[in-house]
Amino acid sequence: MMWWGQHMNGFGWGAWLLGGLMMLVFWGGIIALVFFSIRAFSGSGNCNTAHSTNSSETALDILKQRYARGELSKEEFETIREDLKI
């Protein structure tokens, strides 16, 4: 008498390994889908507000802000301001 159930029709333990890996891939895909969906709809994407500017800001306004923050020396400020007035 043959016991087909013990060897899973000739696949042996390999079917268990393949089935387990496929289950991990499936659940990993579901978790990744949920994660990226939440991230996309939450509005916390790659929006960097520190460098975003209004379209109504002029180059001179941005230059003044940089000078006020201390990013530019007085000489650099004056040089760039003169260049912008052309």
Image (cartoon, rainbow, N blue to C red):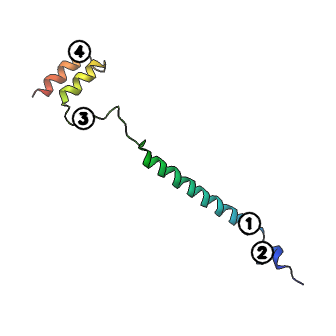
* Circle 3 Cα neighbour tier, 10 Å, few/some/many (<14 / 14–19 / ≥20): few
Going by the picture, which residue comes out furthest to the left?
86
Q: Position of residue 37 (x, y in %)?
A: 47, 52
Q: Is residue 28 above or below residue 60?
A: below
Assign a secondary structure to mark 4. Answer: helix
Give the alpha-carbon distance from disc 1 to disc 3, as whole Å.
Answer: 59 Å
Name the residue: 21% across, 20% down.
77
Give the alpha-carbon distance from disc 2 to disc 4, as whole Å.
Answer: 81 Å
Give the alpha-carbon distance from disc 1 to disc 4, as whole Å.
Answer: 72 Å
Going by the picture, which residue comes out furthest to the top?
74
Mark 2 vs mark 4: give the one in front.
2
* Circle 1 Cα neighbour tier, 10 Å, few/some/many (<14 / 14–19 / ≥20): few
Q: Position of residue 11 (x, y in %)?
A: 75, 74
Q: Which quadrant holds the C terminus?
A: top left
Name the residue: 52% across, 50% down.
35
Mark 2 vs mark 3: give the one in front.
3
Point out which mark residue 74 bears.
Answer: 4
Q: Report whether 42 appears left or right of 15.
A: left
Label 3 or label 4, whichever comes before in sequence order:
3
Looking at the rendered structure, the kind of residue marked 3 is Asn
Label 1 or label 2, whichever comes before in sequence order:
2
In this figure, which residue is indicated by the disc labeled 1? 16
Looking at the rendered structure, the kind of residue marked 2 is Met
Looking at the rendered structure, the kind of residue marked 4 is Lys
Q: Report whether 11 appears left or right of 57.
A: right
Q: Is residue 54 above or below residue 12?
A: above
In this figure, which residue is indicated by the disc labeled 2? 8
Residue situated in front as seen by the camera: 23 or 17: 23
Residue situated in front as seen by the camera: 78 or 53: 53
Decide: marks 1, 2 in contact (CB < 8 A)?
Answer: yes
* Circle 4 Cα neighbour tier, 10 Å, few/some/many (<14 / 14–19 / ≥20): few
In this figure, which residue is indicated by the disc labeled 3? 54
